[in-house]
Image (spheres, grey):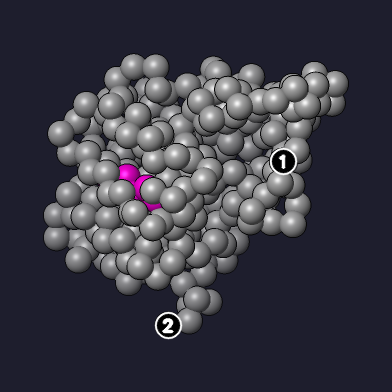
Amino acid sequence: MSEAHFLPDVTVLSVGEGDSRRDIAMRLRAATIDGAPLALVWLSGYSSDMEGTKAVEMDAYAAENGLAAIRFDYSGHGRSGGAFTDGTISRWLEEALAVVRHAAPERVVLVGSSMGGWIALRLLQELGKAAGDAQVAGMVLIAPAPDFTAELIEPNLGDAEKASLAERGFFEEHSEYSPEPNIFTRALIEDGRANRVLQGIIETGCPVHILQGMQDADVPYAHALKLVEHLPAADVVLTLIRDGDHRLSRPQDIERLLGAIAEVVNAGTPGVAN
């Protein structure tokens, strides 16, 4: 099955005003079956984009099952404009909200990977505030990293990182996935505090399936357990994968991901997908 067969054309949406205006690249797939007003929304991780393995497999699943699919690149990522170092959770959330509102599906299943899991939870909260916005019918979270700036970065900052943040406004660390280092800015960390979700009960109103590798060196599986404590709904499933890493992109991991998406889609729209 050709990957190209499943890649809709890239379109661009302008988000923000004045100096904060940036062009966001999107791939929007229309539903092909009647009575399926449900779209899968891909939310990438930090420094990742909409062309990754999991994102493309989600899109292929949507195509095979006649569902709509929404993918996009945050500003500073992939094909989108804007500087990566200008990125914050609030900024990327604004872009996610703008893309979903532009596509205007009636209902969505949010599929978020790593930081995308945090964006998904915040997007759920924002979509629930305005009449006419898409209803969240379910969530699939892969190695979710909600509040990672406050929970996983700040407590582990050393003297060198603190000095770099104070003097340069950012610090760098080695990346296991790219020859370029990861960059974390003071603005990202400060903005992260204003977007924390692990502060109380998270009312989702929909089924949630979390996939988490137990060999994840970036987001420990204890973080997924903590997230579950904040999700009171009975329809929350946590799948721990004993030999799974952070990416969860192996064939067996993709199979689990597509199975989780199918379960959540069927729960949200019975009879639409297998």
| Residue 62 appears anywhere in the view | no
Toward the viewer: 261 or 129?
261
Q: Main secondary structure of the magenta part?
A: strand
- Quadrant of res 144: top left
- Report which residue position mark 1 lands on: 173
**Secondary-structure class at tag 2:** loop
What x and y, as percent, mark residue 202?
31, 24
Q: Is residue 2 magenta?
A: no
Quadrant, the C terminus: bottom left
Circle 2: residue type: Met
- Quadrant of res 141: top left
Q: Residue at x 41, y 56 (%)?
A: 244
Toward the viewer: 236 or 25?
236
Q: Is residue 272 positioned above or below 134 on the image?
A: below
Q: Is residue 148 positioned above or below 163 on the image?
A: below
Q: Which mark is residue 1?
A: 2
Look at the image and give the residue range highlighted in magenta. Answer: 209-213
- Neighbor class of circle 2 (other Cα within 10 Å; few <14, some 14-19, many 20+) is few
Q: For this view, does 46 lie left or right of residue 158?
A: left
**Secondary-structure class at tag 1:** strand
What x and y, as percent, mark residue 147?
49, 27
State the separation of the CA atoms marked 1 and 2: 38 Å
Q: Is residue 211 magenta?
A: yes
Q: Which mark is residue 212?
A: none
Q: Residue at x 66, y 25 (%)?
A: 157
What x and y, as percent, mark residue 239?
28, 49
